[in-house]
Image (cartoon, coloured by chain):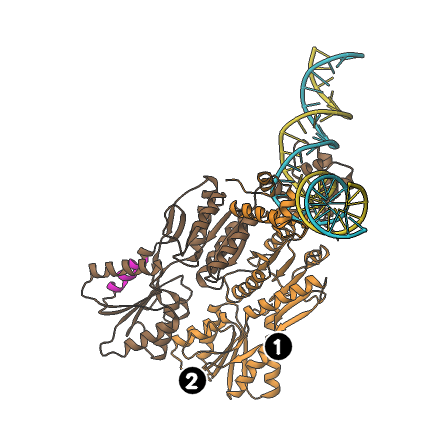
Chain colours: A brown, B orange, C cyan, D yellow
Amino acid sequence: MTNTTLKLLAQQLQLSISTVSRALKNHPDISAKTKAKVQALAQNLDYEPNANAVQLRTQRSKILGVIVPTIANFFYENFIAALEEESSKNGYTLMIFQSSHNVENELNNLKIFRQNRVSGVFACLSNSAENIDVYHKMNEHEIPVVFFDIVPKDNTITKVRMADERCGVLAAKNIIKRNAKKVLAIFGDPALSISQIRKTSFQNFMTDLSPKTNVKYINATSSNEAEEIFKNHYNKTVKFDTVFCMTDEILIGVMKAIQALQIKVPSEMGVISISNGFIPNLYYPVISYVETSGFQLGKLAFVQMMANMQTGKAVDELTVEAKFIEGGSM
Amino acid sequence: MTNTTLKLLAQQLQLSISTVSRALKNHPDISAKTKAKVQALAQNLDYEPNANAVQLRTQRSKILGVIVPTIANFFYENFIAALEEESSKNGYTLMIFQSSHNVENELNNLKIFRQNRVSGVFACLSNSAENIDVYHKMNEHEIPVVFFDIVPKDNTITKVRMADERCGVLAAKNIIKRNAKKVLAIFGDPALSISQIRKTSFQNFMTDLSPKTNVKYINATSSNEAEEIFKNHYNKTVKFDTVFCMTDEILIGVMKAIQALQIKVPSEMGVISISNGFIPNLYYPVISYVETSGFQLGKLAFVQMMANMQTGKAVDELTVEAKFIEGGSM
DNA sequence: AATATTTTCGCAATCGTTTGTTATTTTAAT
DNA sequence: ATTAAAATAACAAACGATTGCGAAAATATT
């Protein structure tokens, strides 16, 4: 069965295409009688306007592009879910690509966005150090770009992110509150700015307000690595009494070690992490965490995108506030 | 900056639009010299073909639609990730919507798919009992539909799913192998066919091969409910020694109870679940599970879609095989 | 009844491509 | 040198919608 078009409707009704078009959008020029006839037939024949034709003619698409390293990830899936929710509400549609942390894929995806004349792009860089000229080029083509999560240093562009400094501070604050003596603090990939920011803020706060707390700083790039690190350090003579996990990945490794070693939480070991809360809630007691929500960030990113599209270009950096969620692990 | 078009290139080069078009696609009619000139300028001006115009003209879109209840979910995120991987490889683009388990949203999303003339739809019903006429209508409009996960009973349509019978059987088999005496088997929402299939196959196998094993069957629709159920039943005088969890959700609740009650796994309690493996791997010991992979299902769905698109219409039901993964919980 | 006004609708251009057909130029064949 | 053949490029009609403008018909004004 062929798709119904305005032309087809017009033929069957012995009307012109323009009349049919206007009738369907309730244009005042068209009489009520004609409108009724047109709309009835349209309904009958399952007429749906061809988005390609509309977009070609009106020169604007209702599509927003999204690039994430991978969809299957706590943070990104929530970010996307929020984005999709808002987009749907506002009549937009999402075109989602995975870069798989590969710059070549990323460039290719951007090309497809351009071909589809998307009206905006949400981008998470696949390489924090990469060249962002291509994004500037998007802006030249009047396609606003909102960066999130892994963002370029460049400050002529729009970015949204978690208030990572606050995350570090809140974590440190609660560790001090617990009156910890010896702390193992595990951070993520040291190459990522997010790790740097969280660590710096954590460390500064810690040394300023509780200089005599013994803190061992260390980096881990996977769950397994975190698990090993924990086990190795736990065998030392002076046991630490509190562990800080910068990400869910690290928390997962640490918790496996804690379960394996049958360490009691929180009496023998305090645990605190930065997370959206899903992983912390899998354990008993629930792990205390500083909340960073991909969902909230998605909402913020969308708002920012709309602003950006209306004002032409809004260079700005916005952050989502973080807060401490008490579990039972501290 | 305005977008470059064939027209613009043609003007600047003093050539006709058709020549430019053909030059860019290496048509044999065009001389090497002209091709070189055209391609150079195109590159220079960042020319990207307008996908809307192309699709309008060629009457085919390279877009595939996906409807899931929510993106933020272990199963769906992996399904989508697989789909996106394959789509990208094959020059397709994904348009993803969340139905939020709401039929109205679902219908609206289908409408947008029609407007965009997507060349295929992957659909997960938001209500297992719903009317699927609208999907038949998609087929009439020559848009193939592949159902997954929550599929209609109708067998004139294409569906892919996990081999859920095998899942039930494999779980039962390993419970018998453990020599369990008293089993608590928790299944999901009884309204979903997936729960019914898994339960029936589990139960049949169990009663056939080990009729004297005492099995308590029960349903839970959330993690919290599963946790409560476990706790309530564990307080009984005759303790069960093995628990079966039909989904990750249920496993999460059960494991919280197990941790809270400080039950030793596997000595005091055997645990087995059906999962993609992520959640089982968060615990120590790792929970044994029957593997069902959203990722694999996504791959299968894509293959099926391609077949469907080529052969015109392939009514078929395909399943992904399941296998038992040994953790340390049995 | 003649003119002015308003309603109602059709014409035609346009968005950016693709592609069948035709026209022109170049090269080859006699 | 003339003609045939091959190479190269232009013309023009779609695809399906939107929209400014003008024409015809219906109604209102005098």
The residue that disc 1 covers is B165
Asked whether disc 1 touches disc 2, contact meaning CB atoms under 8 Å apart, the reply is no
Q: Amino acid at mark 1?
A: Glu
Name the mark on residue B177: none
Say if labels 1 and 2 share a chain. yes
Image-based side of A17 in relation to B171, left or right:
right
Range of residues picked out in magenta: A167-177
Secondary structure of the magenta portion, mostly? helix
The C terminus of chain A sits in image quarter: bottom left
Residue A79: x and y in percent read 46, 56
State the image coordinates of residue B186 (x, y, percent, origin top left): 52, 75
Taking the spot 53% from the left edge, 88% from the top edge, the residue there is: B177
- C-alpha span from label 1 to label 2: 28 Å
**Location of mark 2 (residue):** B268
Left or right: residue A186 versus residue A296 is left
Q: Nearer the viewer, residue C14 or B220?
A: C14
Determine if the magenta segment contains residue A171.
yes
Among the two numbered marks 1 and 2 on one chain, the one whose residue lies closer to the N terminus: 1
Give the chain of mark 1: B
Is residue B71 something that shows in the picture?
yes
Residue A164 colored in magenta in the image:
no
- In the depicted view, which residue is nearer to us: B95 or A297? B95
| Residue B37 position in % (x across, y down) | 57, 46
Task: Find numbered disc 1 in the image and state the secondary structure of the residue it sits on.
Answer: helix
In the depicted view, which residue is nearer to us: A8 or B2?
B2
Up the image or down, B68 lies above or below A18; here it is below
Q: Position of residue A88 (x, y in %)?
A: 54, 50
Give the quarter of the image for residue C14: top right
Would you call the spot at circle 2 few (<14 residues within 10 Å), some (14-19), or many (20 or more)? few
Callout 1 environment at 10 Å: few (<14), some (14 to 19), or many (20+)? some
Q: Amino acid at mark 2?
A: Glu
Label 2 secondary element: loop
